[in-house]
Amino acid sequence: MATSKIHSNIIFSQKVADELGKIVQQFPAGKVFLLTEETPKELCLPSINNVIEEYGIKTISIRGGEPNKSVRSVEQVWEFLSKNGADRKSLLINIGGGMLTDLGGFVASTFKRGMSFVNIPTTLLAQVDASLGGKTGINFNGLKNEIGVFNEPDAVIINTGFLKTIDADNFLSGYAEMLKHGLIKNPEHWEELMQYDLKKVDYDSLQEIIAHSVAVKEWHVQNDLTEKNIRKALNFGHTVGHAFESYALYDNRPILHGFAVVYGMIVELYLSAKVCGFDQVKLNEINQWMLQTYGKFEIESSAYDELYELMTHDKKNEGSRINFTLISTIGQVEINKDCSKKLIIEALDYYRQL
Ligand code: GLY
């Protein structure tokens, strides 16, 4: 596995074909492969068709969606690579959303103990979070990202033009991770996100804002690739958020990841106020904005036990304690925080009554 790479090469470009062409040239003929899924295949793949044709890149498309982030899909891609003579000197290009780049990264990291891979994320969530930072993996036994490895891509090509192909909810879902980046590390970034007109997306200014968000993510990854320490900051909103996401699924009211993270951040901001002294006025101001922008996932108090139980199963916990990342002020994070069950229930009550 190519674990010696510490930093990804992140390229912002509206000319994906040119950037990809430069990368592909470095690999032997017949050794470059491409993995995609349905939507990007139709909407984004045409922009790199000339590179695919010029270099004879063999392409495989898998079904998208969380249920297909599976061992079966991985096997399908391994089989394709094996039949087409891929080896350690080969390159896999992953073009798609976060599910696709997570799975493709895992396939490449494990095939013959590791081949190179490049991510071309096509959703906002993938551009600011999933495709960066080397968390690769698949779901297993009903558990999200249960199997995987840390391994950074050789390059990530970010074309914000692709975002014109995603719907408003998926845009908001990715925006949630940007909000998180502002809250944990960069007050200026938080302010620009608050100023941004979400009702009338200006694609021209988007690249700069996305670059600020990517810089926050990269800072954490570069300082702690395998999440032993400061990378845990990126989990803000996720301990409660993942519980909401799973609960919503079991309750047949599925929500997008970023929406769950927003609801998680609302609860964890309350915990931040109680445990780390986060300002009460700011708490109310931010949470009102979050609810106005993202709506509310309604819960009854009868859901608390299940939500708490789900939090105790979070893979980021250490031993039996639920490990929270909280903030004391915008831009100032506190990792490895403990919260009692009583306080967590109080925070869920606060959310329910908003
Ligand atoms: N999505 C959080 C992380 O990459 O650490």
Image (cartoon, rainbow, N blue to C red):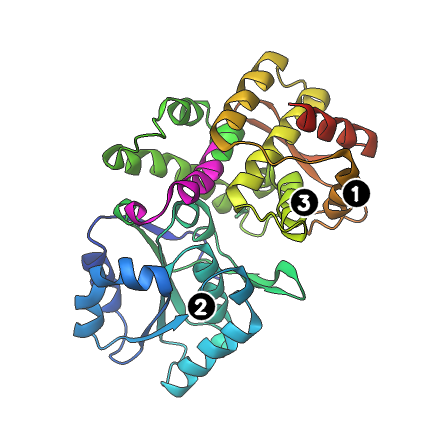
| Residue at left offset 57%, top offset 32% | 296
According to the picture, the residue beneath numbered tag 3 turns out to be 243
The numbered mark, 1 or 2, whose residue comes first in the sequence reads 2
Other-residue count near label 3 (Cα within 10 Å), few / some / many at <14 / 14–19 / ≥20:
many
User: Which of 168/118 is in front?
Assistant: 168
With respect to residue 342, does 69 lie above or below?
below
With respect to residue 16, does 304 lie above or below?
above
The numbered mark, 2 or 3, whose residue comes first in the sequence reads 2
Magenta highlight: main SS: helix
Other-residue count near label 2 (Cα within 10 Å), few / some / many at <14 / 14–19 / ≥20:
some
Q: Quadrant of residue 34?
A: bottom left
Label total for image: 3
- Circles 3 and 1, Cβ within 8 Å, touching? The answer is no
Q: Which label belongs to residue 321?
A: 1
Q: Is mark 3 within 8 Å of ligand 1?
A: no
> Is 81 left, or right, of 13 in this rendering?
right
Q: Amino acid at mark 3?
A: Ala
Q: Amino acid at mark 1?
A: Arg
Which region of the structure is painted magenta? 163-179
**Distance from label 1 to label 2 (Cα)?**
37 Å
- Image coordinates for residue 133, horizontal then vertical, percent: 47, 51
- Image coordinates for residue 240, horizontal then vertical, percent: 66, 39
- Image coordinates for residue 96, horizontal then vertical, percent: 38, 59
Secondary element under disc 3, as helix, strand or loop, is helix
According to the picture, the residue beneath numbered tag 2 turns out to be 63
Residue 247 colored in magenta in the image = no
- Image coordinates for residue 52, horizontal then vertical, percent: 22, 71
Q: Is mark 2 within 8 Å of ligand 1?
A: no
